[in-house]
Image: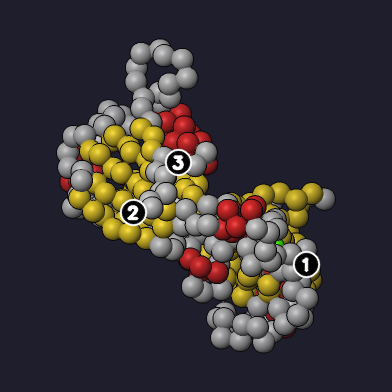
Amino acid sequence: MNTEVIVTCAVTGGSEPVAHRPKTPKEIAASALDAARAGLAAIELELEELPGLFDMAHALDADAPLVLDLGRVRGTAQVTVNGRSAGVRIWRPYRFDVTGLLRAGDNRIEVTVYNTLGPYFGAGYPTPYVYGGQEASGLFGPVRLTSSESAARQRADLSGLANVALNGLGATVTASSEHPSGRYLSDSVVAGHTSGERWAQGGGWNDGTEGEFPDWLEVQLPEPALVGAVRVITLEPAARYGIRDFDVLCRRGGEWVTCAEVRENEDEVMTVPIAPVRTSRVRIVVHSSNDDMYSRIIAVQVFARPSGGMQKE
Ligand SMILES: [Ca+2]
């Protein structure tokens, strides 16, 4: 007996003023995601030429791979473009190379997401084996079509700067929590190592609140420094275990100021440029990780002007 139920939804836009019909790309995307959260199994997108918004002919001529990035997905995702398969992804990153499948003019992209049974078992048969981050399933996005050029991250210029976040230089660390095993202490992130070789043996910080966010980690410098970049190294493979969304905050004038935001990270090493700020306290606030369970950080490096070269602001 086949009891499979597939819920589908074609989200449309349009120029005529019809109540409740999404019109702008943002409204269409929001409607598609609302439908997905309501139990939608498949999304069909008509990708039309949108003068001033998206020029397919130009994108195809750019000589750079075009990538469909589904953002955050819990489950399995399958994509077809104009009726041809672009592949199946069962874990992050949920990215599909669609370069050879797109054409000038209108295109049809179909995304099918096969949910996990985690939410079903979590709600119907409560069990400790459904962890906090597994209680949601489906497509969460954001869904984006990008060229690899536009996906390149902004690079930080570290010339003239040096890492001052080292316990040998007097730096100390506090954190919102630490794992109760005692093997992932926060002050290990300024011990000087940059790889996860000694993870679980005192070689990195793992928070102590499973499935709960935000978590934070704070580096205190022995004296204020003119900081120009912060490097955060997370556990690899980062697409599975790394921190995903986080903010870099600096203490300034008695309050916390957000200096940088990183979203949808899947890299092990993130070097984040910030506008130069004199501070002695830098905080990493983690909003999510790629497994939705723990915040894991191998090292935090704070790049600043050597103290001899400090200028007054
Ligand atoms: Ca936590």
Q: What is the spatial separation of the Cα atoms under label 3 and label 2, in whole angstroms? A: 14 Å
Question: In the drawing, what numbered circle is on residue 78?
Answer: 2
- Of 48 and 156, the residue lying toward us: 48
- Left or right: residue 281 versus residue 303 is right
Q: What is the spatial separation of the Cα atoms under label 1 and label 2, in whole angstroms? A: 38 Å
- Of 249 and 148, the residue lying toward us: 148
Question: In the drawing, what numbered circle is on residue 40?
Answer: 3
What residue is pinned by disc 1?
A: 177
Q: Secondary structure at mark 3?
A: loop
- Are discs 1 and 3 less than 8 Å apart at CB? no
Q: Residue at x 69, y 84 (%)?
A: 202
Q: Secondary structure at mark 1?
A: loop
Kind of residue at badge 3: Leu
Q: Residues within 10 Å of mark 2 (few under 14, many from 20)?
A: some
Kind of residue at badge 2: Gln
Disc 1 within 8 angstroms of ligand 1 (CB): yes
Q: Dividing the picture into quarters, in which one does residue 290 lie?
A: bottom right
